[in-house]
Image: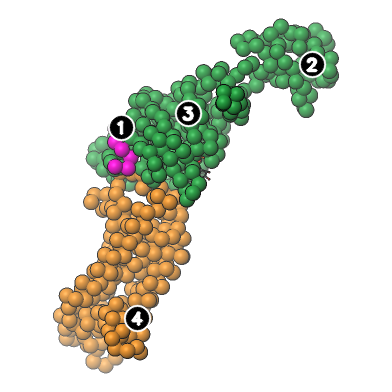
Chain colours: A orange, B green
Amino acid sequence: MRATLTIALKEFRGYFIAPMAYVVVLFFLGVSGLIFVLTMAMPQAATNHYRGVMQSMVFITLMMAPVLTMSLLALERGRGTLELLMTRPVSDWSIVLGKYLAAVMIYTGLLIVTLLYPLLMSVGGEVEWGTILSGYVGMFCAGLAFMGIGLFGSAITADQIAAALSAFFILLFFWIMGFVAQSVPSGLGDVLNHLSFIEGYLEFAKGVIDLKNVVYFLSLAGFFVFLAERVVESRRSV
Amino acid sequence: MIEAAGLTKFYGTHPAIQDVSFRVSEGEVVAFLGPNGAGKSTTMRILTGYMPATEGTARIAGFDVTEESLEARRHVGYMPEHIALYPEMRVTEYLLYCGKLEALETKKLFERLEYVLEACSLQERADSIIATLSLGYRQRVGLAQALLHDPAVLILDEPTIGLDPIQIVEVRGLVKKLAGKHTILLSTHILPEAQQSCERVLIMNHGRIIAEGAPDKLTTQVRQAESYRVRVARPSSEVADRLRQVPDVLNVQSGPDGAYGVDTRIGSDPRAELSRTVVQMGWSLLEISPLELTLEDVFQALTMRKESAA
Ligand SMILES: Nc1ncnc2c1ncn2[C@@H]1O[C@H](COP(=O)(O)OP(=O)(O)O)[C@@H](O)[C@H]1O
Ligand SMILES: [Mg+2]
């Protein structure tokens, strides 16, 4: 547990040194800020519109997650520092969870910063905090899943770009299934819809925290973190 | 302190090491000696818990490296062959991170930090960013990291590889200083290095341990003669003939560069006699020096002995 935190904190600090992380953070805050400003410029800016902002933020998160996570394990493997880390009295789970936690921490930080937008809105008018809260729970849960997929991408290769691309394709796969669902027979379509991110997330944005959707994102996160751990462990015996 | 029994490791179908067994007692300094590809790193990676053996068992301080891996790892300080550090970190920051991974208490950690910075002569560079350090300094950071938690066992994989001669002497000195405080297993493909730093060598070739013993004992076992290199200004067959007549000389061969390889009886040192002979004959003596036994000589002798025994 202590080792997990040690690794998470080191990795978290690392985010403030790597230029890539700054680019990603600026991208996230910049784009969501821009969308927010544009939304606010519309007459009768309200919670309704902020829903749109939250929806686009989830999509930005999807694009950002692979970049934010690509270095976590791939860089250590590429540089050779993983060998030393894996001979320290630290379990593979601590390593993987520590890395994951760092990504989750930075993402949570970003989400908290974006809470400024609805706060600003509340100065000018009425805000439905319930819907906003639900949207943020959704974004947080979706982020957990996205970061888990990113971590898995980073575990399977020593190359950061390959890691980011793998994660991105997996994310895109889950995203696209929602669209595919609409154009196939309803039986299959339902299955695909359940597998896709979109439907689950849209419900959050509507203001409904459905346990089913929380479980969906959390199990996705757990599944991919678990896979990442398996990969790290199996690489020992190559 | 280190026990390996029947270690075998396959990479796919290729056996990197086969049936490697040895023991290192507490406080011993032992070298793994062998050419590249012999299986030294593979054995060390198993001992440090980085990867499991395909077959066989190993124990560090009594703990099985696969069954009780975390406990075993706690007792090992490891310096891998290719020293890999986090370039963006500062030396102290890196060492503190390593210490926290070892779960050292804060007070102990700072005591040890001070000690390893001093022991590895790193004080002046303690605040440097690792990326700015020379290879020699990085090697020291690697060693400092291995020493940080005061492990019973130190495993150093080719600790002097890539260093310049001055740095090599420094690292050897450091190993000498640490001997006695830790049980040390280091690997090298350079014979003199094993001879100078270690009490015992394990000679490895093609994934197997082919001989072991004290370095001087091994060399005398291997050596059938002392050898010297004698170089004169104008070599001729007369020179070789005359050198052969010097007492204790067993054999004289002329080399391509005008030097003679002179084999003499074990325990003799006829250098004075040789030089007198050359000078008396009016030839100019350019060089006379003992020929160091090389790893190749040792291997040749060992494999030859095996063949003749078979
Ligand atoms: N990761 C690996 N995958 C496949 N073969 C390997 C790997 N590492 C080492 N080998 C092979 O195993 C043998 C032993 O290598 P190694 O233990 O590195 O030797 P040494 O350290 O003595 O130079 C060599 O033939 C090498 O090619
Ligand atoms: Mg090696």
Q: Position of residue B210 (x, y in %)?
A: 51, 29
Q: CA distance from mark 4 to mark 1?
A: 54 Å
Q: Secondary structure at mark 2?
A: helix
Proximity of marks 2 and 3: CB atoms separated by less than 8 Å: no
Which amino acid type corresponds to the residue marked 1 in the rendered image? Ala
**B38 or A210: nearer the eye?**
B38
Q: Looking at the rendering, which quadrant does residue B78 occupy? A: top left
The earlier-in-sequence mark between 1 and 2 is 1
Whichever of labels 1 and 3 marks the residue nearer the N terminus, that label is 1
Which residue in the protein does label 3 denote? B202
Give the class, few, some or many, for how many residues have Cα within 10 Å of label 2's Cα (few <14, many ≥20): some
Residue closer to the observer: A175 or B232: A175
Judging by the rendered image, the residue that carries numbered circle 1 is: B61
Q: Disc 1 to disc 2, how far (Cα)?
A: 57 Å
- The three-letter amino acid code for the residue at tag 3 is Leu
- Mark 1 vs 2: CB contact within 8 A: no
| Ligand 1 contact, mark 4 (Cβ < 8 Å) | no
Q: Tell me which amino acid carries mark 4.
A: Met
Task: Note whether A187 is above or below B88 in the view shown.
Answer: below
State left or right for residue B121 relative to residue B162.
left
- For mark 1, give the secondary structure: loop
How far separated are the C-alphas under marks 2 and 3? 38 Å
- The region drawn magenta spans B62-67
Q: Could you say which is closer to the camera, residue A33 or residue B6?
A: B6
Q: Is residue B247 magenta?
A: no
Q: Chain of mark 1?
A: B
Q: Earlier along the polypeptide chain: callout 2 or callout 3? A: 3
The reply to whether the C-beta atoms of the residues labelled 4 and 1 are less than 8 Å apart is no
Instruction: Chain letter for mark 3, please.
Output: B
